[in-house]
Amino acid sequence: MANRYIEKYVQCVRMDGLKTKLPAVFSSNVTVTGTLTASGTVVSGGLTNAATQALGTTGTIAVTPTSTILTSTPTGNVTYNFALGAIGAEVWIIVTTSGASSYTITLGTNVKSTGTLATGTSTGKVFIVNLLSDGTSWYEVSRTTAM
């Protein structure tokens, strides 16, 4: 993917045969041919894969993603207004139902979505919504039905 910031260490073999680790920082396009394996925390588009980010569960919530995985268990109707994301940033929203009532989730400010999501009244069902940013809006790429 273009214009991603990656910071990691690259293992190098020096001329004298000793192995050393050097910081590898790429702030422009990187092309990888073959397999790229990364371990540890990977930061892409300002978002980390190291932890999930819990969202508010009712009302109007301002969301500034810090993780690629966002979670929510709504306790009432909720609107998520997103801060703009970096070009190419991608988030996955995992919604788990509480079952007491059906709540409506609205993806509000800065999100182009296919519409609201109704959670239904079954406990423990999961919906997953995928959003992708072009730097000016988040776009809903896909969503599942209740699983």
Image (tube, helix red, strand yellow):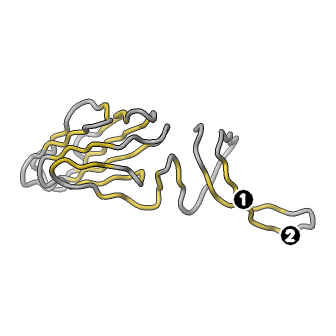
Residue at the image position 36 percent from the left and 33 percent from the top: 139
95 or 43, which is in the foreground?
43
Expressed as whole percent of the image width and height from the top left, the position of residue 46 reads 49, 50
What numbered label is drawn on residue 69?
none
Mark-to-mark CA distance, 1 and 2? 14 Å
Element on which disc 1 rests: strand
Q: Are marks 1 and 2 in contact (CB under 8 Å)?
A: no
Left or right of 118? Residue 66 is right
- Please name the residue that numbered disc 2 is placed on: 18
Left or right of 101? Residue 107 is right
Left or right of 35? Residue 16 is right
Residue at the image position 92 percent from the left and 67 percent from the top: 16
Q: How many marks?
A: 2
Instruction: Name the amino acid, label 1.
Output: Val
Considering every residue shown, the one lying at the far right of the view is 16
Element on which disc 2 rests: loop
108 or 129, which is in the foreground?
108
Instruction: Name the amino acid, label 2.
Output: Leu
- Please name the residue that numbered disc 1 is placed on: 10
Q: Residues within 10 Å of mark 1 (few under 14, many from 20)?
A: few
Residue at the image position 24 percent from the left and 47 percent from the top: 147
Left or right of 20? Residue 101 is left
